[in-house]
Image (spheres, rainbow, N blue to C red):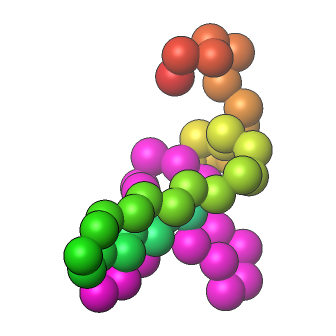
């Protein structure tokens, strides 16, 4: 099974893109994107822990 997720506290994905995909079956995988860490308004936080 595949679960596609786009958290609401980060920027919206562009085109046919998903921020996270969870694949489950005999094992469970979580695949994360490599896009910039922008918030929901498109800004990069000054604090890297956000």
Q: Tell whether position 17 is magenta.
A: yes
Whether residue 7 sits left or right of residue 45 in the image: it is: left
Image location of residue 38, percent across then percent down: 67, 42
Q: Residue furthest left?
A: 26
Residue 38's place in the image compared with 17, above or below, is: above
Residue 37, quarter of picture: top right
At a point 64% along the width and 57% down the height, the residue shown is 33
Q: Residue furthest front?
A: 26
Image location of residue 14, percent across then percent down: 72, 73
Q: Say whether residue 28 is visible.
A: yes
Q: Tell whether position 6 is magenta.
A: yes
Residue 15's place in the image compared with 31, above or below, is: below
**Figure label count:** 0
Image location of residue 8, percent across then percent down: 41, 55
At a point 72% along the width and 52% down the height, the residue shown is 34
At a point 59% along the width and 41% down the height, the residue shown is 39
Image location of residue 16, percent across then percent down: 67, 86
Q: Nearer the viewer, residue 14 or 42?
A: 14
Quadrant, the N terminus: bottom left
Residue 44's place in the image compared with 35, above or below, is: above
Q: Say whether residue 5 is visible.
A: no
Residue 33's place in the image compared with 3, above or below, is: above
At a point 42% along the width and 59% down the height, the residue shown is 30
Whether residue 11 sits left or right of residue 7 in the image: it is: right
Tell me the chief SS of the magenta region: loop
What segment is highlighted magenta in the picture?
1-18
Whether residue 14 sits left or right of residue 10 in the image: it is: right
Whether residue 21 sits left or right of residue 25 in the image: it is: right
Q: Nearer the viewer, residue 43 or 29?
A: 29
Residue 5, quarter of picture: bottom left
């Amino acid at each position: 099974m595949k679960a596609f997720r786009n958290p609401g506290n980060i920027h919206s994905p562009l085109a046919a893109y998903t921020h996270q995909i969870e694949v489950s079956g005999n094992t469970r995988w979580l695949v994360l994107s490599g896009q910039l860490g922008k918030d929901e308004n498109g800004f990069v936080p000054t604090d890297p822990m956000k």
